[in-house]
Image (tube, rainbow, N blue to C red):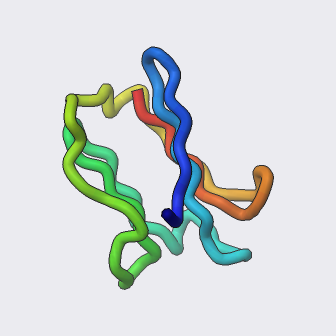
Amino acid sequence: MPYKWQQQLADVDISVPVPKGTRARDLNVVIGKKKLSVALKNQEPIMGGELCKEIKVEDSTWTVGMFLSHELRVLVS
């Protein structure tokens, strides 16, 4: 599995490995009420699909950078 996730009561934190040097402009991240997709621009999604429940899009965010490794972090609520 190319990504990992952790779930709390109200949030899910998803970590997706990306190539070193990847910047936000290199990514296509879609966070919808019942959809989540993560891809490098002009490539097939690394992960994506329909969610089983609606999320709060306005409370969901994503960042890219050095955490434990070079990865994209998506937090959905």
Residue at the image point whose x is 48% and y is 68% from the top: 27
Say left or right for 9 vs 65: left
What is the residue that sits farthest to the bottom in this orientation? 42
**Who's the residue at 33% across and 58% down the image?**
37
User: Residue at position x 21%, y 30% from top?
Assistant: 53
Residue 55, given in percent of the width and then of the height, sits at 29, 29
32 relative to 48, above or below? above
Compared with 6, 43 (above or below) is below
Q: Residue at x 21, y 29 (%)?
A: 54
**Which image quarter: residue 46?**
bottom left
Q: Is residue 9 left or right of residue 43?
A: right
x, y (%) of residue 66?
A: 77, 57
Residue lying furthest front = 1
Q: How many marks?
A: 0
Location of residue 31 with respect to 37 vertically, above or below = above
> Which of 59/11 is in front?
11
Question: Which corner quadrant of the image does residue 45 belong to?
Answer: bottom left
Looking at the image, is 77 positioned above or below residue 69? Answer: above
Q: Position of residue 40 (x, y in %)?
A: 46, 75
- State the residue in front, 27 or 9: 9
Q: Quadrant of the C terminus?
A: top left
